[in-house]
Image: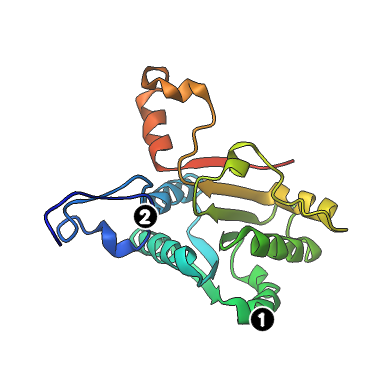
Amino acid sequence: MLDIPIISWVATAPDLNDRDEYTTLSRTLGPFSKMGSFLVEVMKLYNWRRVVIISSNYLQYKDATAAITGVFLDNNITIAYQWTYDGKSLCFAMFRFSHLRRFVSVIYFINSKQDRRRFMLKAFDLGMCDGEYVFYAIDMLPDESVANLWPLWKVGDDRDDDARRAFEAVFHVSTLVEVSKLYENPRNVAPSTAEFRSAVSWRAFTS
């Protein structure tokens, strides 16, 4: 590479983590491997060792899946089942989803919000939203609707109420989103909290 500074807003490929190769690259949005490291800490907290990953192969979802999967494997997290689908195989992925219950109770979605809602409605129909299963949804980019707690389940159809109830079982993990003026002054934030927020923001949506 040329020996000049390169600043990228979003550069998601895991290969760009190689600081020996990309010595002058800076990203204003952190790599997805940082999100994976945070998720590993959550897994350790609850003594979870096995996960299922359902992901889209579209652009940044593919990069995020590769980065997070790599971190899981490096930390001895077993991926009991992984399914990557494209637009043509979404229906088949939905069919396969009904067979996941026997594998594990922790399920990660790395896909669009529209697809996520479809899968969660399927989970609701299968009785998987009663607390026995935990769902994590990976949000690719800081999103104003996430910061404002916009109801991601709501699209205006006859299944909005079911979707709302299904999403009570979902934790959303995203890159940093500043949601309070408290964080405009670093002195207001304890070091451990600041370090945590530098990697991801994590919140559960129940409404």
Query: Is 26 rendered above or below residue 18?
Result: above
Disc 1 is placed on an element classified as helix
Q: Quadrant of residue 93?
A: bottom right
Calculate the distance from the C-alpha at mark 1 to the C-alpha at mark 2: 29 Å
Q: Residue at 53% across / 74% down in the picture?
A: 84
Left or right? Give the position of 197 relative to 161: left
Quadrant into which the N terminus falls:
bottom left
Which disc number belongs to residue 92? 1
Q: Amino acid at mark 1?
A: Phe
Left or right? Give the position of 12 relative to 95: left
Left or right? Give the position of 193 relative to 46: left
Q: Residue at 46% across / 45% down in the picture?
A: 175
Disc 2 crowd, CA 10 A, few/some/many (<14, 14-19, 20+): many
Which x, y percent locates residue 79?
Answer: 47, 68
Q: Foreground residue, 195 or 31?
A: 31
Q: Foreground residue, 87 or 162?
A: 87
Which x, y percent locates residue 89?
Answer: 62, 81
Kindly give the residue lying farthest to the right in the view shown. Answer: 158
Kindly give the residue lying farthest to the top in the view shown. Answer: 187
Quadrant into which the C terminus falls:
top right
Instruction: Kindly identify which residue carries mark 2.
Output: 33
Disc 2 is placed on an element classified as helix
Q: Foreground residue, 84 or 125?
A: 84
Q: Amino acid at mark 2?
A: Ser
Q: Quadrant of residue 163?
A: bottom right
Q: Residue at 53% across / 52% down in the picture?
A: 139
Which x, y percent locates residue 185?
Answer: 40, 20
Which disc number belongs to residue 126? none
Please say if the residues under marks 1 and 2 sit with CB atoms less than 8 Å apart.
no
